[in-house]
Amino acid sequence: MGAGFLKGLKGLTLAALALASLVAGAEAQGLASLPPAPGMSLRGDAKPIAAWTTFCQDYAAECAIDRTEATKITLTPATWAAIVSVNRRINKAVEPMTDMEHLRVADRWDLAEDGIGDCEDYQLLKRHLLAEAGLPRRAMRMTVVIDEKGEGHAVLTLITDRGDLILDNKTDTILPWHRTGYVFIKRESQDAQAWVSLGGATSPVTTANR
């Protein structure tokens, strides 16, 4: 697929994404079906994932903190439709493959430029597209969890006026964080290029699964 994969996904506006989701009709998850959720409790500093540190060196704009941005996403029908659209679109478009299978490295974070990626690559690409569409990157935080297999896994937390919601490549359904069944370990800070603890179990070294 090459560089054309990412290029083909660029230039999307909030209106266009909302329209794409509305076209899906009954298949799209409705905002009305989403109950308000509590936010996560933050519990001090946490050590970043090593591959995230390298990612931030290579993709500095993706990790920059803009303190003028909103810290929460206001979920209007159009914003929600755009989120649903991007989540479904990227889950379908990216071919799942571990970094070891794909690149012969234990863990690498990127934007799935060649159309292949594992869990964190899906979420980084979703955030990239939603930020391009006008959502505040500061309210979209990469998050490390322990999944149902007891393995390290990366999801994207959307900090919204209806609580903390999770975008995940394992499902197209957007869930409140406390309904995912995951153990939440840590996530990117909203105030600095750093990570904060969410009080879960011992942090995994990598998030290198599909």
Image: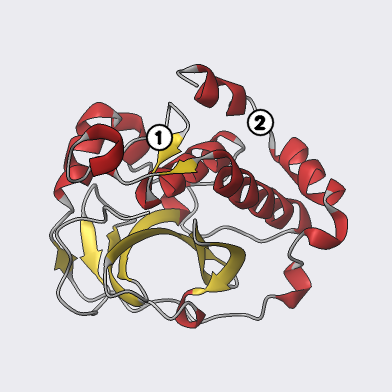
The x and y percentages for residue 162 are 60, 72
The residue singled out by tag 1 in the image is 111
Q: Is residue 51 left or right of residue 101?
A: left
The x and y percentages for residue 105 are 18, 39
Q: Is residue 116 left or right of residue 205?
A: right
Q: Determine whether the residue tagged by mark 2 lies in a helix, strand or loop.
A: loop
Q: Determine whether the residue tagged by mark 1 lies in a helix, strand or loop.
A: loop
Quarter occupied by the C terminus: bottom left
Question: Which residue is rendered at x = 33% and y = 79% of the image?
Answer: 41
The quarter of the displayed image where residue 90 is located: top right
Q: Earlier in the sequence, mark 2 or mark 1?
A: 2
Disc 1 crowd, CA 10 A, few/some/many (<14, 14-19, 20+): many
Residue type at numbered disc 2: Leu
Residue type at numbered disc 1: Leu
The residue singled out by tag 2 in the image is 12
Residue 88 visible in the current orientation:
yes
The quarter of the displayed image where residue 109 is located: top left
Question: Which residue is rendered at x = 18% and y = 53% of the image?
Answer: 49
